[in-house]
Image: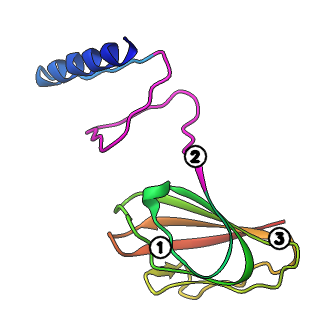
Amino acid sequence: MFCDTVSNTIKAVTNMTNLGIMGLYINAPFRASGLARFDGNIRFDGQLAPPINNLGTTSGLVPLSFANGMAQKIELNGNTTMANPLEVVEGNAYRLIVYQDGVGGHTFSLSANYTWTGGAFPAIPGGAGEGFLVDMLGVSSTEIMATLTAFQ
């Protein structure tokens, strides 16, 4: 029943859009999958919180696919390099949360398709349990601009 209501609401909005009127109000939990395109401004009242995909505890060359979510989390248990990202959309913002394990001292690097503010990869926190946040912006389908913020 709810899906039928949402479907009919979206059809009605589509018809209104054809007339130059745009508005959509859904006062209920709503989940959509696949590609949705909105032209113009979108306002969210409340929080817009994508789930954080947990890549687990790992080391070595680690694949990073944003098809799994725009926010990713990883714990380092050895020296780690993030592979060139997959499923990058130009203009999208992404986040990578990185923690050192209980031992710490592990190196972290990103592959060639990442570029850093200031040009050079910054020093990362290396102590046990310390972490950092990598904020990224998709510049193209293969290039990511990134900044790093340390936290403890």
- Mark 1 surroundings within 10 Å by alpha-carbon count, few (fewer than 14), some (14 through 19), many (20 or more): some
| Range shown magenta | 27-53
Q: Residue at coordinates 40% horizontally, 69% vertically from top-left?
A: 86
Is residue 129 toward the left or the right of residue 31 in the image? right
**Residue 53: mark in rendering:** none
Residue at label 2?
51
Amino acid type, label 1: Met
The residue type indicated by label 2 comes to: Pro
Q: Inspect the magenta stretch and tell me whether residue 48 lies in it.
A: yes
Q: Quadrant of the N terminus?
A: top left
Residue at 33% x, 70% y is 140
Residue 130 disc label: 3
Q: Which mark is residue 145?
A: 1
* Residue 8 is covered by the magenta coloring: no
Q: Earlier in the sequence, mark 1 or mark 3?
A: 3
Q: Is residue 102 left or right of residue 86?
A: right
